[in-house]
Image: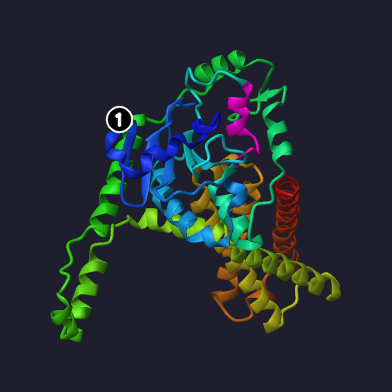
Amino acid sequence: DKDAWRDGLRRYLDDPAEHADVITYDDEFVVVQDKYPKATVHFLVIPRQVLSMGVGDLDREHLPLLRRMADLVAPLTASFPDLQVGFHSVPSMRQLHLHVVSTDFSSPSLKHKKHWHSFTTTFFKPLADVLSTIDSTGQIAMRCERERELLEATMIVCNQCATMFKTLPQLKRHLISVHPATVSLDAVKQLLSTIFSKKRTATNAPVEVPSPKRQAHASPTATRQAGSNMQQSRPHLSCSEYAMVVASRLYFSAFYRTVYLIMIASSVACVAWTVANHWRTPTSEVFISLEILLCCMLVVEVVIRMLALKRKFWKRWTNLFDVAASVLSIVSVALYFHQEGVMEELEEVAADFMMMFRNANQYMRLAVFLKYVSVRDDVDG
């Protein structure tokens, strides 16, 4: 079989300890150093069950596996924001595998434009986007020929500053001089070993298995105690890591988008109400309650996004409007609860300005959101 090489990753499934390029493993996953790494950090997370499929073959039945993979790499991306995690649209190897690669792309194995495009265009599907799309639509719509065309793009764009280059050597010199690697391979490996060590401790915690006779007469107290011991043996995540994991799951879920649309609808309703009130801020309890709800939702939404995106949040200039809107919302809620009738005591111009400014931010956010949705639909569809 001339394509037998495409099953090369399966050799790691049965006996990972026999292979020198295996970084770590447990009963569920094996992590392998990429044979031709394209960056300072580049390894593969491979499920130890045979799964001859690509990202386009995944559906809702695979969501539990994908979520466990997301939980596994969450501490890595939390500690090293310069790591990106995802799948190739059209993988060269048959066994399902997840790429974890640093964004410096400093490697002698990065030799061709298609290597660059495979990680810096929509050919690379981030794990978070895959989870979100499958959770909402059931699968990833894939056009293989269209995806392959992305690898043949002529122009090369720097993933750090969007500078364009005609040749790969020009780009590599630019990356080394302007955007040098900031992540340590040894540090990533050490954290990865710690993650798997905790995971193995939880999985392999010694639990007494009673004989059939003893099991038949086991007391409820003993059963509860065994369950308690197993629960205590679960790996511990720090508060910040746990918050980031929860935020990532919320941010890349269908529930998040539903909340976002409700927030936009509430904002439009507030503006329409103000217009109907001759451009004066209404003072009814219903309106104030809606305003407080909107402000709280906005602040929570921005905080979730900050935790989920980490440093990448601050790289998008549009997010500065979100921060401004959040601060304004906190001030608004504080004023609402300061004392009764505070809206009557505020100058009408100031109150209306606050209302208009916050909703102007909402319309900008709506435009950005719709643009994001249209771009993603165009790629996935």
- The residue under the point 71% across, 26% down is 153
Which stretch is magenta? 113-124
Displayed quadrant of residue 264: bottom right
- The residue under the point 70% across, 26% down is 152
Figure check: 62 above or below 109 = below
Query: Can you see residue 158?
Result: no
Displayed quadrant of residue 11: top left
Q: Position of residue 177 (x, y in %)?
A: 51, 16
Decide whether residue 42 is among the magenta residues. Answer: no
Figure check: 145 above or below 68 = above
The amino acid pointed to by label 1 is: Ala
Quadrant holding the N terminus: top right
Q: Is residue 224 left or right of residue 33?
A: left
Q: Position of residue 185 (x, y in %)?
A: 36, 30
Q: Is residue 167 left or right of residue 209?
A: right
- The residue under the point 23% across, 66% down is 232
Query: Can you see residue 151?
Result: yes
Picture mark count? 1
Q: Main secondary structure of the magenta part?
A: helix
Question: As drawn, which residue projects farthest toward the front?
Answer: 1
Q: Position of residue 259 (x, y in %)?
A: 63, 67
